[in-house]
Amino acid sequence: MVYYGKGIACAATGDVRTAEKYRELYAAAAKKVPPTRLDFPNRIVDVLKVARLCWMASWSIAKGNFEVAFKHLANAVEADDALLYTEPWGWVVPTRHAYAALSLEQGRVEDAARAYAEDLGLDGSLTRAQQHPNNVWALQGYHECSVKMGREAEAGIIAQQLKVAVAAAECADCFVVLLPEGGCWWTESRR
C-alpha cells in the first residue's frame, strides 16, 4: 500500500513518470498476494482491486483522460460495493467521493449529486453499512451540487447539516478541496 499511496500522490501532483514507476511496483507487489489471503471476511485481492482501480483513475486524471478515469472510478465503486461488511471497512476511502468529485469538476453535476446522495444514504439505494451519513466531504460536495442545480431549499438544509458535521469532526480526513483563491476548504470552514 506504500506504493499505492506514493503513486496516488505523484499522480495528484502531475508527476506521471514517477507515478508510473510506483504503479509498476504496486502491481508487482500485488501479484505476490495469494488469492487465499484474507482480511476477514474479504479476500485481500478484492481489496487490492479497489486500490488498483482508484490508482488507475488518478493516473488517468493526471494524464487528462477523464473519460477513462470515470470508467475506472465507476468500476472502483462497484468493486468497493462488492466487499463484504467489516469494521473497519475493507476499503476505508469512500470511492463514491472520488467519482462524485470528478463528476462535479467536469460539469456532470447531476451525476455528482446522485453519487453524493447515495453515499450519504439519502436515496436508500445502499445498505446502511455502505452509507456514510453526515460525512463532511460528501455533504460539502452535495451542497455544491444543490447550489449549482438551483435547489435553494435543499442547499440550505444541507448547509446546516454540513455546519453540524464540521463542528463535530475531530480532524480532516482529506485536504484535496482547494479554494480558487488559495487555501483549503477545511481550514477556511473552521475559522
Image (cartoon, helix red, strand yellow):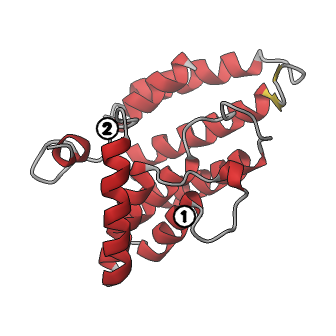
Counting from the top left corner in percent of width and height, residue 22 is at: 51, 22
For mark 2, give the secondary structure.
Answer: loop
Residue at position x 77%, y 15% in the image:
32
Q: Amino acid at mark 2?
A: Phe
**Circle on res. 24:** none
Residue at position x 32%, y 47% in the image:
166
Q: Which residue is mark 2?
A: 175
Left or right: residue 21 compared with residue 164: right
Q: Amino acid at mark 1?
A: Ala
Quarter-wise, where is residue 175 in the image? top left
- The answer to whether 187 is drawn above or below residue 133 in the figure is above
Q: Can residue 105 be seen from the camera position used here? A: no
Q: Residues within 10 Å of mark 1 (few under 14, many from 20)?
A: many
- The answer to whether 47 is drawn above or below residue 70 in the figure is above
The residue furthest right is 36
Q: How many marks?
A: 2
Q: Can residue 68 be seen from the camera position used here? A: yes
- Given residues 165 and 115, the one toward you in this image is 165
Counting from the top left corner in percent of width and height, residue 30 is at: 70, 21
Counting from the top left corner in percent of width and height, residue 78 is at: 71, 53
- Given residues 21 and 177, the one toward you in this image is 177
Asked if the residue at tag 2 contacts the one at tag 1, i.e. Cβ–Cβ closer than 8 Å, the answer is no
**Circle on res. 115:** 1
For mark 1, give the secondary structure.
Answer: helix
Residue at position x 36%, y 42% in the image:
168
Q: Residues within 10 Å of mark 2 (few under 14, many from 20)?
A: few
Image quadrant holding the C terminus, namely top left
Q: CA distance from mark 1 to mark 2?
A: 20 Å
Residue at position x 77%, y 40% in the image:
85
Image quadrant holding the N terminus, namely top right
